[in-house]
Amino acid sequence: MPDYSMKSFSLLLISLLAAYVLFPQTNNPSNPDLFIQQANQNLSKNDALAISLAKKVRHNQEATKGQRIQSDIIIGLAYKNKGQYDSSLYFVNSGLEKALEVQDTMRIIKLYSNRGVVHYLKADYKAAVSDFKKAGQHYQTLGEEIKTDTAVYLDFARVLNNTASAYIKTGQSDSALTYFIKSLKIRDTYNAPQRMLIVSKLNIGSIYLATGDTEQSEIWMKEALEGARQQKDSALMEKCFINLGIVDKKTGDTLAAIRHYKNSLALSTQMGNARDQAIALQNLALLLSKQKKYEEAYRYFKRALESNNAIGVNNSRLHHAMSRMFVEQQLYDSAIVHGNVALKLAKESGNLEVQMEEYVLLSKAYKGKKQFHRAFGSLEEYVAIKDSITSRENREYIQNLKTEFETERKENEIVFLKKLNGIEHAKNTALQSRQRLIVVVVLLAIVLLTVVIAFYLSKKKKEKKLCLIEKKLLQADLRNKELLSRELNFEINYKTKQLTTHALNMTQRNTILTDIREKLKKLSKNSTDKLSMDFMSIIKDINQMQRIEKDWELFKKYFESINKDFNKNLRAINPALSVNDYRLAALISLNLNIKEAAAVLNITPSSVKLARHRLRKKLGLHTGDDLYIFLNQL
């Protein structure tokens, strides 16, 4: 029994000793490095545990500043992984403050980069650009050290790549392109993984595509495709094919576009990428339809509809494209079926553009079926939507003007009240000062018994008060003049905007009436005699409406309220100017282009060009003189 107890005791002692040797500091709060190591290992796997371990270091009094900064980095990353971006920013900012205090450059870079990622995920792209650029600037301060450490340089390339991605989101394509190219050069120089280089080339090609430089885009896309083929990377090959299809489609190389989209479709189907399958199918259907290969296009349309339904995409544009294809084939019943489906889906998604285009197609289909009443009804729906868009834009514009006016008025009131409060405060201060001065004067009078001194001081005080009052009156007068000047400037700006809006409304109305008149002329050719007479009656009414002078009188009223001496100055240059010359001059002074002026004057653009030339001659302008500048200097 005693031997058995000794053996058990010995085994227990050996087990405890082994545990101490293997895990000497597991429960020792004075060793933060172990907690940091364990927290790093749990990032992404168990972010809650990583946060808990890192916070132990953060609250450990024996931890160094570097260890606390590292704990803030880990907690920030863990909260970012959990999607709790505000909490992530709190700890990243805390770590950054400490790192800047001790000038820990590598951790400063890491924290700026991490904060940029969080801002990017929060869709605050300007802040993301700022943080990524600050991280890049601190890389530059590393000097020779950065040139000898490949890992550091590749991390610098990653920051440049992130900066480019953020610039894309802000719409600054040129800056994005610059940073993508810088990143690629570094990655290429320091032998980054091939997949990283391919992605960089694909990004550069996409930027060129977005800016309309299809030639450069194709060069970079093909380089990326060659690399992807060498790596046998199906996902990247598929991305390259789909982007090359877009390039070919833009440059008009339909056969090449079809070939690339088919390659993309094969790879995306193989990988089960439903989104890219849908894109490839839809583009193939559109391209084949354009080539008049309607049967093949129809098969792709059906597959595209199935793919879009599977991923929950609104099919209004697809049905609209099918409706167009059937109209081209004069299969009007099918065109009407798909057109109505397109309208229903477009109304559900609020897509007014598809609705307008579809109503035009339906009018053609109904016309083809000799259902002129429905054809005309579709055109009326088209015009109604177009008018509603114009009306809504005008309402928004007027509301914005009102908001700006109210904001400026309130700001002026606030400034005025602040100045008024300042004046009152100055009066109170002056009153207190005068009261103290009186006490001093009285004391001096009592002590010195000098009436002369008291009288002298009283006189000085009155002069000072009068001077102050005069100064304040002058300041108040200047403020009133400034406010009056602002009000006049605002009124001029408001009337100018009213005048431009009225001219644009006249342009839009005449353009719409002209479109309707031409369409009615076309319809009347294929109609019965009675309908043709009705159409011609409507066309006559439209022509009459376009000749009404009421709009011009209102336009003249607005224009002369802003430019009182405009016509007078023109008449002084050439008294023989006609009414149409005055009208054209007014439109040119508003910077309307030839098409807009033609729509307002209800004449052709070529007639406007001729009228401009004649006006230049009547005004005695030379070849190099700018007519717009000349008119605005009158």
Image: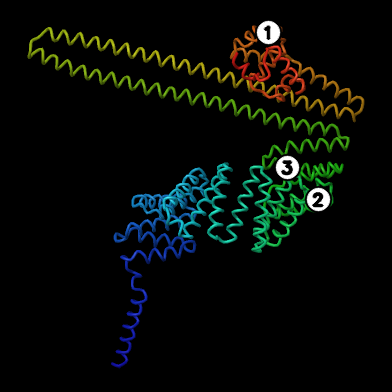
Q: Which residue type does callout 3 highlight?
A: Lys
The residue that mark 2 highlights is 297
Residue corresponding to mark 1: 574
Q: How is the image coloured?
A: rainbow
Kind of residue indicated by mark 2: Ala
Instruction: Give the quadrant of residue 610.
Output: top right
Mark 2 and mark 3 residues within 8 Å of each other at the beta carbon: no
Q: Is residue 108 above or below residue 596?
A: below
Q: Nearer the viewer, residue 235 or 613?
A: 613
Q: Earlier in the sequence, mark 1 or mark 2?
A: 2
Please give the residue where the numbered disc 3 appears in the rendered image: 344
Checking the image for residue 46, the label placed there is none
Whole-angstrom CA distance, mark 2 to mark 3, is: 23 Å
Task: Give the secondary structure at mark 1.
Answer: loop
Kindly identify the residue that appears in the image at 18 percent across and 17 percent down: 437
The answer to whether marks 1 and 3 mark residues whose Cβ atoms lie closer than 8 Å is no
Helix, strand or loop for disc 2: helix
User: For the residues marked 1 and 3, what is the alpha-carbon distance in whole angstroms?
Assistant: 59 Å
Quadrant into which the N terminus falls: bottom left
Q: Height in image: 304 above or below 31?
A: above
- Residue 383 image-quadrant placement: top right
Q: Residues within 10 Å of mark 2 (few under 14, many from 20)?
A: many
Three-letter amino acid code at the position of disc 1:
Asn
Could you tell me which quadrant the C terminus lies in?
Answer: top right
Q: Earlier in the sequence, mark 2 or mark 3?
A: 2
